[in-house]
Every structure is written in structure tokens, then in C-alpha cells.
Image: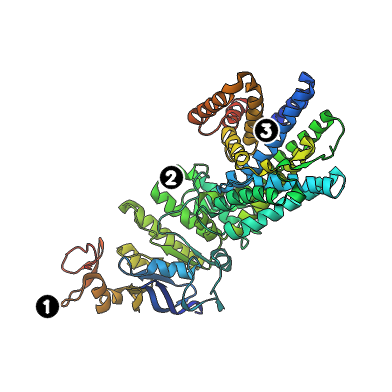
Amino acid sequence: MDILKADRVAVVLASAALAGAPLLFASSYTTGVLTVALCFGIWAASWDFMSGLTGRENFGHSLFIGAGAYTAGFLNVNFGLSPWWSLPAAPVVAVLFSLILGLPTLRLKGPYFALAMLSGAAVMQNLTIIFSEYTGGQDGLNGIDPMLDSPFAYYYLVLGVLIATTVILKLIANSTWGTILRAIRGDEASSQASGINVNFYKIAALMISAAFAGLGGALYAHYQLQVGPDLFAIVLSINIIIMVYVGGLGSIYGPVGGALLLSVLTESLRAFSEYRLWVYTLVLMFILFFMPQGLIAPLWRRIRSFAV
Amino acid sequence: MTALLIVEKLNKRFGGLHAVKDVSFTLKAGSITGVLGPNGAGKTTMFNLLTGFLPFDTGRVEFEGQSLAGLPPHKIVNRGLVRTFQLARPFLGMTVLENVEVACLAPRVRGEGKPGLRAQALLDQVGLGEKSSQLVDVLPYGDLRRLEIARALATRPKLLLLDEPFAGLGVAEIQPLADLIGALHRSEGLTILIIEHKLREFMQLVQEVIAMDFGEVVAIGAPAAIVRDPRVIEAYIGKSTFEEPQLAVTGDGVGVARGQRFGSPLR
């Protein structure tokens, strides 16, 4: 069995496991938790594509998520469009935001991109409160229509998008594009001296990252049937970054695993009630301290090396 | 022979420091030229100006009859003017092969066959063929210098700027690298400009030397003539009122005649 075949088998097995999960529990509560976990998977994979590959940390991924979610909310609640319009519209709006912040800051060396993303998300969070007559302020936009009537069916739709997102991003990362993005992470000046248009690739990577994050945001909005300013919150961005590091930076599939693992972990720790955050933080510290390369991606590489 | 690169009255200031001052020279196609000068003479700054890594204040740089003013580094590379760095700057976390593959993806050479195959051929050429699957992070310094050259060659340059390719190399590594550079010049007709400042191998390699001091070109000529030029001698060991000192090419590099070894410039 070669590496490619092993990876394909893993994709099929992981997809089958995720497809079987709601059947196993057969409760709408569990299906809901898992749907949210899938959304986090999309967000983590899209964050990793830009920041894991090029090394330019994005501290405001929630900006793209919120932009996608609010686009879905506006089109559906304010303009009365069918929820399906969210699927093409949310990525477009998220990409526009990536251009507004990426074009001026990704050319610069230093922390400007990270800071611009961080403040961009914070500014948007405040703008949703300031323009409350359109955005609903703290309450957000309510009464968003579901795309599918059955939450179970919707779970499979989101799962399909997650699998497609992961496969597409991984294929790009394995192509010559991925080689160039990793070279930019290695040394920007050397990339330029190798004839590579570094700014073009960084901005293009951010646009792709934003598109999938926005798509995930729209899917989340049509699951929650509500969007609020918290979708722009910094804590959401930070949670996604933690998921990526737990999964394994730069591997795309690792962060998806990290997102699923931590999302489910957060829910299953409800039994600890007020000690929940304590336990969660301890688990995180344990993983990051003893497995600085992450949990999922190094684990799979080890399994694969046995199988091949 | 036609002029490949024309540099005219090139100037760069960093605040009060006039780092490159009215530098003018011409490189003929197929020539191999050295840039000599003590530390701080403006050699690397001049390389940065020619390759677009720094914008120049005034002056003219013409490559194959076209101005390079205001072009970003990657566009200059894709015109055929490529540089290496004084300190090797590999793409960490990638294999030796991938490091060269990146340069094979430059628009200028993208259509020229499979990047992986081209990269392997280039690694064979510089003597790194067997190390292609290693991570660059574990490569010794001498190999990193060869890797820099392979990466530069991957973009199929017409003019190759080498910034101190021998710096930090052991005695045993210098001659093979000099042979490689000489072979590139002879067999591929590559025009080469090398910054270096103290090696016999270097003086034997180049046809012409541009000597710089305090940002200015102080002399241009054949290597043998340059080491006797009073202004070059002054740049290296200062002015003497008692006797006429002479630089000589010794086994250790450019040094003061009468067997005295040249240490640091007397500044």
C-alpha cells in the first residue's frame, strides 16, 4: 500500500465514521453538537491553509466567519432570499473582506497582518452593535430559515461540505501551490529571489482561506438559525488556532481532527459543570506540552508508516 | 561582446550614510567579474539595488537594454538576473529537492519540463544529487552554499550575482566551489558578478575586478592590476607616508607584500 492509497483509505474511513456518528446516538442534541463540530472543522482547515502553510498567523479568522454568517442572515432575514443563496454569497463577501485587510497588510513584514486581522474582527463586532437597526445589535438576526427541514439531513450536508473543503485544500497544499506557500513560510526573501511573486500567493491563499471560512459561517448560521456579534469574537479565532495546533499545523486534515476532537470534548465535559474549563485547559496544556507537533497529524503519519 | 548590464551613477543613501555613491560600470555578456572591497564598502547594498530588494535613489540600471528601475525582485529574476545571499537562506522545513523545485516554479522557467526532474538535474550538477531527499535543516554550511547556487540556476539566469559564495567555507570546500563557478561560466556562457574580498581562488576566477570603498568605485581593471592600484591599497591598509606598500595575492588572500598577512582593514 502506498502513501496515497493509505490517505484515500483514511478519508473514506473517517467520512464513514462521521456519517455513522449521528445514527449511533440518534439524538437531535448529539447531532447538533456534531454539526457545530463540523463547522469548526471547516474553519480550522481554512485557517491552516493560509496560516499553517505560509506561516502568517491570522488572529482574526472570526472576521471571515462572521462576514459569512451575517451575509446569510441579511440575505435571508432582511431580503427574504432563499437560504441556498447563502452558499455562493457568503464566500464572496468573506473574500472581499480578505482583500480589504490582506492587500495593504500582507505586503508588509512584521506583525501588521496579524494585528490588522485581530482589530478587523474587533471592529466588525462593534459595528454590528453600533448599526443595530440593521444587524439587531446584541440580539443579532433571528428567525433565519433552515436550509433543510431535517437536522439529520443538514448534518450530512455540512459533512459533505467539510469533506469537500478538506480534500480541496489538501489537494492544493500538495500541488506546486503548496510548495510555493511553504517556501514563503521558509524564507520570503529567498522566495522572491527564486522568482516567486510572494504577495500574490499570500493574498490568494488568504482569499481561499476566507472563502471557506465564510462558507462555514453561513452553514453555521443556518444551523443556529440566528447570528450574533459573538461570531466576530476574538475568542472564536483563538479557539480555532488552538484546534489547529492540537491537530497538527500545516497538515489541513490534522486541524479538522483537532476541531472535531476539541468540540466534542468541550461538550462531553459538561458533566464536570463548573470545573469544565479547568479540565479542558488541563487537557490542552497536556497535549501542547507533550505533543508540540500536535496530536492528529503526527499520529496518522505514524499509523501510515506502519501500514505502508 | 555586447553589454548585458549597464549601471550608471547609481546612488543610495540611508539617512546620513551614502552607502552607494555614483557607481557606474558595464558587464559584458559572458564575462565573469569580481567586486572587491572592505566590509562596509557598499557591495551588498549595490547587489540589493540591482536585484530590486532595495529601491535606488538616483541612477540607471539597464539589463539587456531595459531599465530595471522600480521592478520588484521577482520580476527582475524573471528577466534573467538572479542573486544568491551572503548568508545562505534555505527554505527551512523542506527537502533539498523541494528547495530547488520552488525556483523551477518561477514563471520564467515554468514551462521547461517537470520541476522535480529539473531540480534533481541541477542538484546533480552542483554535487548535491544524493542529498535531494534530506531536509535542508540538517545540511552543512558548504552544501547550503551549493544549494543557493542550484536554486539560482533553476531560474536559468543570464546574469548571476554571487554574494560572498566562499564566506564561511573550509579550505577544502573552496576550490571545488570555485571550480563549479568557473565551469558554469565556461560551459554555459553564464555572465557572473561575484562579491568576495580575500581569496586567491577568487582572483584567479575573475577576468575583471570592480574595487569599491566607502560606496564608491575606486578602480576597475584586471585582477593583477587592481592589487597594485594605490587607491585599492589605501582602502585596505590605509595611506602610508613612509613607504609605498603593495598588496600581493598570497595563499591566504590579498595581503600586504613581504609575507605580512592581511588581517582586518586598518580603519
Binning the other alpha carbons within 10 Å of mark 1 as few (below 14), some (14 to 19) or many (20 upward) gives: few
Picture disc at residue A7: 3
The reply to whether the C-beta atoms of the residues labelled 1 and 2 are less than 8 Å apart is: no
Numbered-mark total: 3
- Residue A109 appears left or right of A99: left
Image x and y of residue A212, in percent:
71, 45
- The residue lying at 64 percent from left, 50 percent from top is A177
Name the amino acid type tagged 1. Answer: Phe
Name the amino acid type tagged 2. Answer: Leu
Give me the C-alpha separation between circle 1 and circle 2: 50 Å
Name the amino acid type tagged 3. Answer: Asp
For disc 2, the marked residue is: B139
- Residue B93 appears left or right of A224: left
Q: Is residue B170 above or below residue B265?
A: above
Binning the other alpha carbons within 10 Å of mark 3 as few (below 14), some (14 to 19) or many (20 upward) gives: some
- Residue A85 appears left or right of B82: right
Image x and y of residue A105, in percent:
58, 57
For disc 1, the marked residue is: B242
Label 1: element kind: loop
Q: Which of the two labelled residues, at mark 1 and mark 2, occupies the earlier sequence position?
A: 2
- The residue lying at 17 percent from left, 64 percent from top is B260
Image quadrant where one finds the N terminus of chain A: top right
